[in-house]
Amino acid sequence: MNYKTVPFEQRIKDNVRNYTLDNLYHMDTIAEYARALGALADVELLLTERHGEKVISTGSFAGFVPDVVGEPGRKVRIYGRTVAHLYAKTKRVPEEKREAVEKLLDEFASMLSHWGEAAYLHTESAIYVDELEEKVGMQHVQTAKGENEDALTGVYNKLYFEERMKVIDRAEVVPVAVINVNINDWKFVNDNYGDEESDRLIKTIADILKQEKKPDYIIGRVDGDVFIVLIPMAEDGEAEEYCKKVQDACLSYDDKILAPSVACGLIYKTNVEEQLADKLPDAEYEMFNNKFEIKNTPGYRERLEHGLSS
């Protein structure tokens, strides 16, 4: 597709049809997460491509022919287009747990849409930026984009943060702690209180991340409700303690509406041959494990919804 003639917004809407799941996801990570979810919820899962080709199966689906038109299961959609279908067998789930499991499956499909959309936008944006660089050079691209900081939060924006990761890789610094920080139930705040409060939540989390960090920590906002924190030459227990301080600060935050909460996924780069970008899916996987624990903690929902009665 010619990037010189097709507007970026139009390309984003159209090009997703050219992507397969392998283009959008780290499939080993998705398969591992699906297996863990299936074992935890006692369900069997099948993930197919948009036309029904089987990709990941955690149970017995022999002889099962997906009907993506008549019985599409849970659709995984990116920018309005279906890219995958999630089927689940829940017959072993006790009746008293069925509603909770169904919600968990809905959230898994939603997370797949979120992950895929982020990967898709990142890839398409990178191609577009390459075109711009060819025309005007990287310096002018940076000028056109403005500051290196994210306008809402004051942490590094995604483009500059990725450049910082490359610098650390080239310097062969190890170990490096990589922390994925995801805001829990940001969409709930946006749906119930609007854009202004949901933006305030993002800024509040960013302020807490900055408040608890040390001078050498590197923080970037890489998606709407996602931050990545890098700790070069992290000492034993330092990154774990940082995550705890951030989560404790969220819990102690007193506000009539907001109830900040984050899930943290921590992994380490320990080999100079590794690339930080390749560690991000692992950190995201750990984050979703932490998110599941937090959102099933007694009192979590009550704290989240306390603003509705204000």
Image (tube, grey):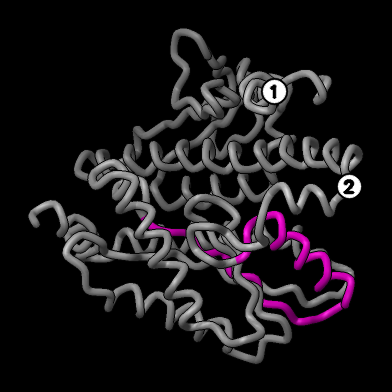
Q: Is residue 12 left or right of residue 241?
A: right
The answer, for residue 27, to whether it is visible in the render is no
Q: Is residue 10 left or right of residue 210?
A: right
Q: Is residue 131 magenta?
A: no
Q: Position of residue 184 (x, y in %)?
A: 38, 57
Instruction: Give me the disc on residue 7.
Output: 1
**Circle 2: residue type:** Gly
Dot 2 falls on a residue whose secondary structure is loop
Bounds of the magenta segment: 156-184
Q: Residue at x 68, y 32 (%)?
A: 21
**Circle 1: residue type:** Pro
Q: Is residue 175 magenta?
A: yes
Location of residue 190 (image quadrant): top left
The answer, for residue 222, to whether it is visible in the render is yes
Q: How many marks?
A: 2
In the depicted structure, whether residue 293 falls above or below residue 3: below
Q: Position of residue 50 (x, y in %)?
A: 61, 20
Q: List the single residue furthest toward the left.
A: 309
Q: Nearer the viewer, residue 81 or 140?
A: 140
Q: Position of residue 193 (x, y in %)?
A: 24, 47
Q: Is residue 308 left or right of residue 86?
A: left
Q: Residue at x 26, y 64 (%)?
A: 259
Tag 1: Cα neighbours inside 10 Å, few (<14), some, or many (≥20)? Answer: few
Instruction: Give me the disc on residue 234.
Output: none
Tag 2: Cα neighbours inside 10 Å, few (<14), some, or many (≥20)? Answer: few
**Residue under numbered circle 2:** 137
Location of residue 74 (image quadrant): top left
Q: Position of residue 46 (x, y in %)?
A: 54, 31
In the depicted structure, whether residue 234 falls above or below residue 9: below
Dot 1 falls on a residue whose secondary structure is loop
From the image, which quarter does the C terminus lie in? bottom left
